[in-house]
């Protein structure tokens, strides 16, 4: 067990990492993202992060206590078409990317990888993990899904190889409309939850827990996974 002094040092160290300008996300275009270097660290981190992201989706689905906002829609659509949840996730990602065109958003390597890999990882995890039985197991699956999603989000964002399709839609709309990112995100997520619920997607405690916890969780973990691009990102 950590002593009080060791715990204080750990907290101080984490705060310093968060404040370190080298640990801040750089505003880079798709080409600059690749030219920034350290791809031997960034690409594996991206791929692992996306795989874990897909796995976190599947864990929450198996918990049957409520899905992440976009996955309420994905699951709702999957109830009406003969396609797996993962395939639906990929299809929706492609449709969302088409909305980037009028917003003049440019996808990066991470954007394309996100659109393809998250759905595949979700289907693979659903194949391995059975639906939870009993409140304890279902609650554990939900909690594991939220925590894993926070780690996965920090990993793929910290790799700095482009936002996911849905994140890019939010930032693009915020930039074009002048509305706050919080307002745009809330509007989009309320809309997809409502549509997904009408189609039969599961909304519940897990949806609420995710909405409340994912922001602070990702914010806390991001300094640990943001790859320092050094002077390459500031040229």
Image (cartoon, rainbow, N blue to C red):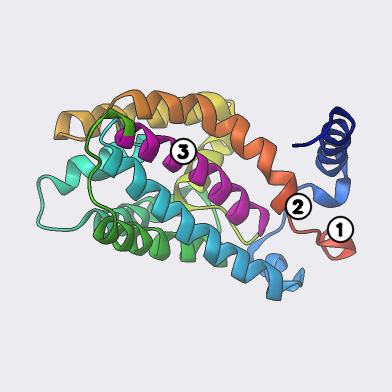
Q: Is residue 234 visible?
A: yes
Looking at marks 1 and 2 on the same chain, the residue that comes earlier in the sequence is marked by: 2
Q: Tags 1 and 2 in contact by the CB under 8 Å rule?
A: yes
Provide the residue designation for mark 1. Answer: 234
Residue nearer the viewer, 81 or 48 = 48
- Please state the horizontal and vertical placement of residue 107, each as a whole percent of the image: 53, 60
Looking at the rendered image, the disc whose residue lies closer to the viewer, 1 or 3, is: 3
Residue ID at (34%, 59%): 119
- Residue 108 visible in the snapshot: no
Lower sequence index among marks 1 and 3? 3
Dot 1: few (<14), some (14–19), or many (≥20) neighbours within 10 Å? Answer: few
In this picture, which residue range is highlighted in magenta? Answer: 137-159
Read off the residue under disc 2: 26
Give the distance between the C-alpha atoms of the residues marked 1 and 3, in whole angstroms. Answer: 34 Å
Quadrant containing the N terminus is: top right
Residue toward you, 198 or 150:
150
For mark 2, give the secondary structure.
Answer: loop
| Mark identifier at residue 102 | none
Residue 153 is covered by the magenta coloring: yes
Q: Main secondary structure of the magenta part?
A: helix
Task: Tell me, yes or no, whether the highlighted magenta stretch contains residue 117.
Answer: no
Residue under label 3, please give it.
146
From the viewer's perspective, is residue 19 above or below residue 48? Answer: above
Q: Secondary structure at mark 3?
A: helix
Q: Earlier in the sequence, mark 3 or mark 2?
A: 2
Q: Nearer the viewer, residue 162 or 103?
A: 162
Residue at position x 12%, y 45% in the image: 79
């Amino acid at each position: 067990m950590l002593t009080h002094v060791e715990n204080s040092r750990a907290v101080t160290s984490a705060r310093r990492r968060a404040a370190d300008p080298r640990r801040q996300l750089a505003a880079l275009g798709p080409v600059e993202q690749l030219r920034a270097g350290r791809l031997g660290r960034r690409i594996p981190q991206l791929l692992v992060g996306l795989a874990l992201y897909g796995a976190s989706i599947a864990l929450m689905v198996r918990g049957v206590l409520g899905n992440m906002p976009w996955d309420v829609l994905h699951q709702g659509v999957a109830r009406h078409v003969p396609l797996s949840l993962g395939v639906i996730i990929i299809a929706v990602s492609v449709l969302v990317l088409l909305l980037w065109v009028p917003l003049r958003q440019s996808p990066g390597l991470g954007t394309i990888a996100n659109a393809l890999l998250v759905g595949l990882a979700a289907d693979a995890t659903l194949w391995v993990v059975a639906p939870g039985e009993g409140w304890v197991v279902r609650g554990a699956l939900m909690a594991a899904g939220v925590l894993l999603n926070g780690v996965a989000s920090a990993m793929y964002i910290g790799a700095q190889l482009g936002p996911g399709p849905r994140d890019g839609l939010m930032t693009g709309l915020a930039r074009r409309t002048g509305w706050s990112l919080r307002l745009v995100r809330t509007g989009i997520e309320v809309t997809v939850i409502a549509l997904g619920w009408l189609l039969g997607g599961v909304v519940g405690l897990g949806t609420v827990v995710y909405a409340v916890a994912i922001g602070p969780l990702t914010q806390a973990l991001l300094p640990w996974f943001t790859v320092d691009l050094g002077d390459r990102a500031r040229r």
